[in-house]
Image: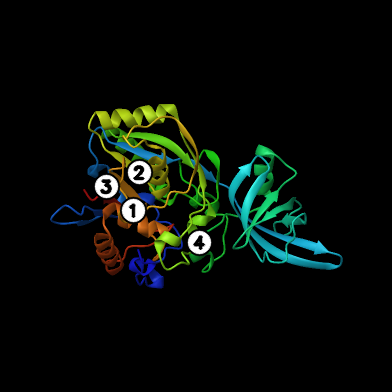
């Protein structure tokens, strides 16, 4: 398909720079393509009323690492600054990163990362150079020690559409982390999960809705623009994910008992669709996924998707268009823009029902 098919105009004032407070006050657009009234305006606090007993909510428990690093490289007396955004852990001491500027970095060169005037610093060696500013860094630290060092020198990697309008601050350290965050490894938040609170989860449990956790470490590639004209030419960056045996068992039981699988966020959906068998059966699974979902994709397992509003021409808008129909989503986004919904990571949400 043509990437232009997924374009739309978004007024800048519709971009949310902070999350709604309280979180349950965020708006919720319920999209049901098969209903006579396909769009219902609601709020997150009323989310449980749209579920049935026996439904299963799937949330992503990845924890965001402060993965935007400022550093310098030095050759003789010449010192040059660089900015790196980590996007995928390759092993216990290596990360792939998008670097600006990367052209003059050389394989084998050492970069020194620091944060403002703080004493902490972190060294990294350029192990490989790839395309489009991608670099593989190898660090002298391993595992949790490396995570701690990154936290000491890094800042929260706010999406470009927020970072261009304001600086990151201490509030983002909690705002840009879901209540499910447990397993460190993401460099972007699974933002649909930002709407949940303990009180909302209790209401869902009281309504007979189960909640299971999966892990997909979201990479910075989620923010990269689609630079090709045809979707067939776009390459997704791989992200690591895992589904436990216990979660797989619950998902299979949900389906067997007639319940619906509700993915919270496109990250959960992409992982579920990557891990499920062609027969729609789950088992324990872990590995990389680079699944790219566009209209025409046949969904195997997810019935309902809760997600925020996405960028024009983005792979995520392509995914929701595959889920509920391109024409429906173009109309839904037009409705959202005209009625004051807030867009992107800190914005409002929609609850999408799959096109049959």
Instruction: Name which of mark 2 and mark 3 comes first in the sequence.
Output: 3
Q: Secondary structure at mark 2?
A: strand
Rendered location of residue 103, percent (x, y)? 69, 66
Considering every residue shown, the one lying at the far front of the view is: 232
Q: What residue do we see at 33% from left, 49% from top?
A: 306
Spatial separation of the CA atoms under disc 2 and disc 1: 21 Å
Q: Nearer the viewer, mark 4 or mark 1?
A: 4
Task: Find residue 323 and report its horizontal and vertical position in percent.
Answer: 30, 52
- Sequence-wise, which precedes: disc 1 or disc 3? 1
Q: Nearer the viewer, residue 119 or 273?
A: 273
- Pick whichever of labels 4 and 1 is earlier in the sequence: 1
**Residue under numbered circle 4:** 224
Calculate the distance from the C-alpha at mark 4 to the C-alpha at mark 1. Answer: 30 Å
Residue 147: where, in percent of width, then height?
Answer: 65, 43
Q: Is residue 350 above or below residue 253?
A: below
Q: Nearer the viewer, mark 2 or mark 1?
A: 2
Earlier sequence position, callout 2 versus callout 1: 1
Helix, strand or loop under label 1: helix
Where residue 270 sits: x, y (%)? 40, 46
Gap between marks 1 and 3 measured at Cα:
9 Å
Mark seen at residue 46: 3
| Distance in Å between CA atoms under marks 2 and 4 | 23 Å
Name the secondary structure under disc 4: loop
């Amino acid at each position: 398909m043509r990437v232009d098919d997924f374009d739309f105009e978004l007024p800048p004032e519709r971009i949310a720079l902070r999350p709604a407070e309280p979180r349950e006050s965020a708006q919720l657009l319920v999209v049901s393509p098969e209903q006579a009234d396909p769009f219902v305006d609601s709020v997150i606090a009323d989310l449980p009323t749209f579920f049935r007993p026996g439904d299963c909510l799937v949330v992503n428990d990845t924890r965001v690492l402060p993965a935007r690093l400022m550093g310098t490289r030095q050759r003789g007396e010449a010192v040059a600054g660089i900015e790196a955004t980590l996007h995928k852990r390759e092993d216990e001491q290596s990360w792939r990163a998008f670097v600006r500027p990367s052209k003059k970095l050389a394989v084998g060169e050492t970069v020194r990362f620091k944060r403002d005037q703080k004493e902490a610093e972190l060294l990294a060696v350029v192990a490989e150079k790839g395309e489009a500013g991608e670099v593989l860094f190898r660090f002298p630290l391993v595992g949790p020690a490396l995570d701690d060092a990154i936290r000491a020198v890094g800042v929260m990697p706010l999406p470009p559409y927020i970072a261009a309008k304001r600086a990151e601050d201490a509030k983002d350290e909690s705002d840009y982390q879901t209540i499910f965050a447990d397993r460190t490894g993401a460099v972007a938040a699974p933002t649909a999960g930002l709407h949940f609170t303990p009180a909302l989860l209790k209401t869902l449990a009281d309504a007979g809705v189960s909640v299971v956790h999966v892990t997909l470490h979201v990479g910075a590639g989620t923010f990269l623009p689609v630079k090709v004209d045809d979707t067939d030419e776009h390459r997704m960056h791989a992200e690591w994910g895992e589904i436990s045996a216990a979660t797989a068992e619950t998902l299979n039981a949900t389906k067997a008992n007639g319940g619906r699988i509700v993915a919270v966020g496109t990250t959960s959906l992409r992982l579920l669709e990557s891990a499920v068998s062609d027969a729609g059966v789950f088992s324990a699974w872990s590995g990389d996924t680079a699944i790219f979902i566009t209209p025409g994709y046949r969904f195997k397992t997810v019935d309902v998707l809760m997600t925020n509003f996405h960028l024009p021409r983005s792979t995520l808008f392509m995914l929701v268009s595959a889920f509920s129909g391109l024409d429906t989503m173009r109309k839904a986004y037009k409705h959202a823009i005209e009625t004051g919904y807030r867009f992107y990571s800190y914005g409002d949400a929609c609850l999408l029902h799959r096109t049959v």
